[in-house]
Amino acid sequence: MNKAFVREPDSTDAYCPHCGSQGETVSAVTLAAQLTPACQQRLSTPAQFCPSPQCRVVYFDAFERQVTVDELDHAVYPKDPDAPICACFGFCRDAIEQDVREGGVTRTRAAVEKAKSADAQCQQRAANGRSCVAYLQKAYTQCRSQMGAN
């Protein structure tokens, strides 16, 4: 078939209207668990999570309506580096830093295993509705680099 007659698919990517980061689609279940009813009503579905730590926008929709960090009733990672990286089990960056200082991975490995378990409730607890495993691994790598570990 001639390519002139084949329609290219429409882009489904959504970008944060504030910082331009590519959004991560979140479910209505995640929004209900993370937002007040008033904030939920402002957003259409599907809504997006802005993963940029520097951006104040947490959620946005196709109409560029936004919910910002200031409107949340709790801190969320990566918007607040002191918030638990693993919202399900409360695992924070300080435990990763302790692992790096000790030259081990005991706490971090345990957090990854718990995050992969059936007890994890990522869709409700994590701001992006996804597993924190990638965030844990990235934080560990960053800590090693910042603390000069080999």
Image (cartoon, rainbow, N blue to C red):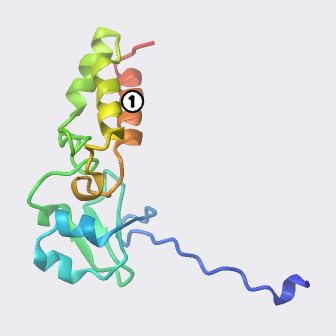
Residue drawn at (26%, 64%) of the image: 30
In the rendered image, the vertical position of residue 56 relative to residue 89, given as above or below: below
| Relative image position of residue 5 (x, y in whole percent) | 83, 90
Q: Amino acid at mark 1?
A: Gln
125 left or right of 136 in image: left
Q: Quadrant of residue 123?
A: bottom left
| Relative image position of residue 114 (x, y in whole percent) | 29, 34
Residue drawn at (21%, 45%) of the image: 87
Residue lying farthest to the right in this orientation: 2
| Relative image position of residue 135 (x, y in whole percent) | 37, 41
Which quadrant, please, contains the N terminus? bottom right
Q: Nearer the viewer, residue 59 or 147?
A: 59
38 left or right of 92 in image: left
Q: Nearer the viewer, residue 112 or 93?
A: 112
Q: Quadrant of residue 72?
A: bottom left
Q: Nearer the viewer, residue 34 or 51?
A: 34
In the rendered image, the vertical position of residue 40 relative to residue 58, given as above or below: below
How many marks the image carries: the answer is 1
Q: Quadrant of residue 110?
A: top left
Residue drawn at (25%, 41%) of the image: 86
56 left or right of 145 in image: left
Which quadrant, please, contains the C terminus? top left
Label 1 element class: helix
76 left or right of 49 in image: left
Residue drawn at (24%, 68%) of the image: 31
In the rendered image, the vertical position of residue 148 relative to residue 129, given as above or below: above
Residue lying farthest to the top in this orientation: 102
Q: Count neighbours of disc 1 (C-alpha within 10 A) and say few if under 14, some if 14 to 19, many if 20 or more.
A: some
The residue pinned by badge 1 equals 142
Residue lying farthest to the front in this orientation: 118
Residue lying farthest to the bottom in this orientation: 5
